[in-house]
Image (spheres, rainbow, N blue to C red):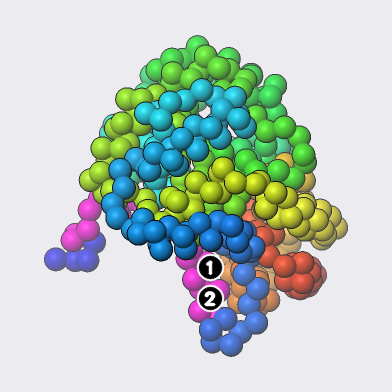
Amino acid sequence: MSHSQVLSHRVLAIKESPTLAITAKAAKYKAEGRDVIGLAAGEPDFDTPQHIKDAAKAAIDAGFTKYTPVSGIPSLKKAVVAKFKNENGFDYTVNEVIVGVGGKQTIFNLCLAVLNKGDEMIIPAPYWVSYADIAMVAEAVPVIIDCGIEQGFKLLPAQLEAAITPKTKLVMFNSPSNPTGAVYNLNELKALGEILLKHPHVLVATDDMYEHVNLTGEKFYNILNAAPALKSHCIVLNGVSKAYSMTGWRIGYAAGPENIIKAMEILQSQSTSNATSISQYAAVVALTGSQECIKPMVAAFKERHKYVVDRFNVMPGLRCLMAGGAFYAFPDARVAIANLHKAGKISAATDMAFAEYLLESFNVAVVPGSAFGAEGYFRISFATSMENLKNALDRIAKALE
């Protein structure tokens, strides 16, 4: 029996997360003594704020180390309800809220709860790496729509209209976007909402994980702010990972129609059960405590963002847009890649070959755009020190000479 015959079609249809794979390779080189600067991982470089860590320690000492209800401790679900009410203007009850093991699990559970074999899930590209693979685990068909730099990396209403078929079950929005940092404004969301309201068989999921990593100071809008009538078939996904620098704590949450949330809970009861009890108690304090801790992080991201985008735009063959949120830059490197290939510096005119060239010859780890459904681009995270960014961008500039 060959190795592949042992494995399910399900797992053979998907790949390891490219960002995690590149981060692992960079770490390996670093351990071997190479001076690698990793710009691949998508997590804030700040420590979790002290008051949140203290809440976790207190939870351990108080013995909050037992099973919790699958969908989350009551105090955290109430905090999530209050967050949606106060920050977004949404009215949910605790029965319409679920807490999962990170944002990724809530998306995974949502897809498994609503998608059947052959259903279509519309995913605007560039997209966060896991959306398409999660759709495939659910045996659905990811329908990828190209939204390049020319349109600001945002889905246009006409593209959405053209992509919807009787088989469309779910549309996935991610604003601010990973990998591009693109943010939809209220009017853009209204135009998309109008189309979705004409197709009530289509569920809408919005991944707002980067809501608080706001680089412009403009008010954040979710599609439900633009089209409140979508509420009966919309699922809002968020979490504490990026806003409070709690990536490893693994707490995500979602709100939506009660029957869908209940189905997600049933799935979770058969997979992970509850999210870690201690992390849940810490997340309560993150959501209900002072939000001042977010400000210094965002201030640092803004400064680095401007520095990075300005530098990329003077490098030959690169073009980079200012982002609205998140902590990524997503330069268009198609011209640079063609030039390097012509000059014989890279073996193929692909972003994969380009990323390999940066890592092997210049000790900089970036993620190729093809990982996000956008060949010819690359992503860097500026969630690292200004010194690291300066050194890394010096090396990238040198690689493009």
Residue drawn at (77%, 53%) of the image: 299
| Dot 1 and dot 2 residues touching (CB under 8 Å) | yes
Which of 174/360 is in front?
174
The stretch of residues the image draws in magenta is: 5-29
Q: Residue at x 53, y 84 (%)?
A: 31
Q: Is residue 98 above or below residue 166?
A: below
Against 210, residue 250 (above or below) is below
Residue indicated by mark 1: 23
Which residue: 29% across, 55% down? Answer: 66
Identified by mark 2, the residue type is Ala
Relative to 164, is 34 above or below? below
Local SS, label 2: helix
Left or right: where 165 falls relative to 297: left
Please state the horizontal and vertical placement of residue 95, each as a whole percent of the image: 37, 28
Cα separation between marks 1 and 2: 6 Å
Is residue 24 a member of the stretch shown in magenta? yes
